[in-house]
Image (spheres, rainbow, N blue to C red):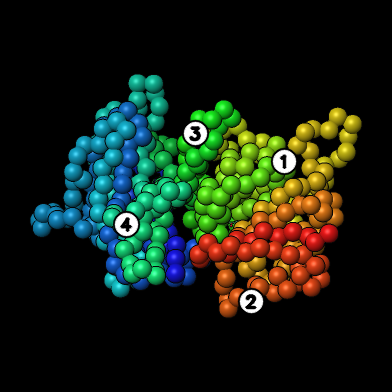
Amino acid sequence: MTNLFYTRYLKPPPNNIILGKPFTIVWTVANDLGEISYWEPLIIRCRITNTSTASLQLQESKNGNSKNNRNKNNNKKLLNNEISTNTTTSVELEYDPVKGGGIMTNTFTVISSNPLKTQKNDSVTIQLVLELASGIKKHPIWTNARRVAMDDDTCCWIIPVYSLPMQILSALSTSHNNNSAREYERRVSIRSQKAGSSQEQYELLIHEDALPSIGSHIWDCGMLMCQYLAEKSFPYFDRILELGSGTAIAGIYAAHMLKPSAIYLTDLEETISTIEHNVSLLQGKHVNIVVKELEWGKPLPLDPNDKKRKRDAFDGTIDLVLLTDVLYNPSFHDALIDTLKQLMEINPKMKILLGYKPRDQGEERTFFDKIKKNLGWQWEMKLLPPAEIYWITSTT
Ligand SMILES: C[S@@+](CC[C@H](N)C(=O)[O-])C[C@H]1O[C@@H](n2cnc3c(N)ncnc32)[C@H](O)[C@@H]1O
């Protein structure tokens, strides 16, 4: 059995911090839905990266759960080194599911920063990463994810969380806002073949919401679909459409790995800004991504058919539909199937690639009964625990 657990900021650090004033993080290690905390103690490394050209000094206060020894007369621990330009220091934190109910609190203070602005007048920023301190090996796709040592049949990946960059401000600053950030970051790495033959390697940054949500959240299926896209070879698909994109982790990954001429990332209206934000993080990466509102069961949002049609205008002709973790509510199946049927009628050769993780005693499997009995569609399934990957086609 393979499980994925995520270090998670329940209260991420704020976007800007005042020099000398403490800031608190509240964190846990939980599954994608957040309802199961990791069940055993873990040592989590809090990696603090100075992303600027200043040098910094940080202190951690004792109300947290740091593993490091402290001076008994002093509840404050100076973190080892001065963190100079583009370097990292780290502190080990104890995750104890019994003590904290899986929820941990730590307090840090940036006590000096020299200078507060760089020579180019850029802000001084740091970033906090929570990752498993040791573990069997790093995952090839999920950046800095490590496996907890377990028996032969059970394996558990701990996926790290990255805070957004935190800007350090002087105590005199008036623009200070001590609120916790609403988002944090996950990273997946891309290794793909460039035109020619050289390999290119880079990381995709995907932001997710710290508040509970369905759409603005990373799910196991999205992570596993990235792995599937990275490991398998695929034929060329000219036009790809993702339904229920959420953070669009799978769709953005597919845009890079499969290099279609156009990829449409779609969801309900309330999730469009999340997708647009994650697409905007792709600065300098040349992929042709169109973000569109598309509600399942409604007529397809086709672009007007003007004479000078744009190359990426959406006319409903799709070669591959990408779906990850969209079967969680069986009452949505009819609407989803209706949209798939509309697309299949336009291009009967269309393929559907679905990542599905069984939940709730597999109640969601009624989806497969419906597409088989009512539409005569067929599929091939590949196991990628804890998910199943389906290639679905129409028989006609
Ligand atoms: C569990 S999330 C999965 C998100 C993403 N595919 C992933 O794997 O990370 C389900 C997604 O389906 C979207 N969704 C739910 N009902 C929908 C509907 N009727 N029309 C369009 N999107 C819908 C949600 O907004 C959400 O983004």
Q: Quadrant of residue 104?
A: bottom left
Number of the front mark, 2 or 3: 3
Number of the front mark, 4 or 2: 4
Near-viewer residue (362 or 309): 362
- Mark 4 or mark 1, which has the lower sequence index? 4
Left or right side of 257 for 102: left
Residue on which the image places disc 4: 136
Q: Disc 4 vs disc 2: Cβ atoms closer than 8 Å?
A: no
Residue on which the image places disc 2: 363
Q: Amino acid at mark 2?
A: Glu
CB of mark 1 near ligand 1 (< 8 Å): no
Left or right side of 258 for 119: left
Ligand 1, seen in the image, is in the quarter at bottom right
Q: Is residue 255 above or below residue 209?
A: above
Percent x, y of residue 17: 36, 42
Q: Amino acid at mark 4?
A: Ile
Crowding at mark 1 (Cα within 10 Å: few <14, some 14-19, many 20+): some
Disc 4 versus disc 1: distance between alpha carbons?
39 Å
Number of the front mark, 3 or 4: 3
- Mark 2 or mark 3, which has the lower sequence index? 3
Residue on which the image places disc 3: 199
Element marked by disc 3: strand
CB of mark 4 near ligand 1 (< 8 Å): no
Element marked by disc 4: loop
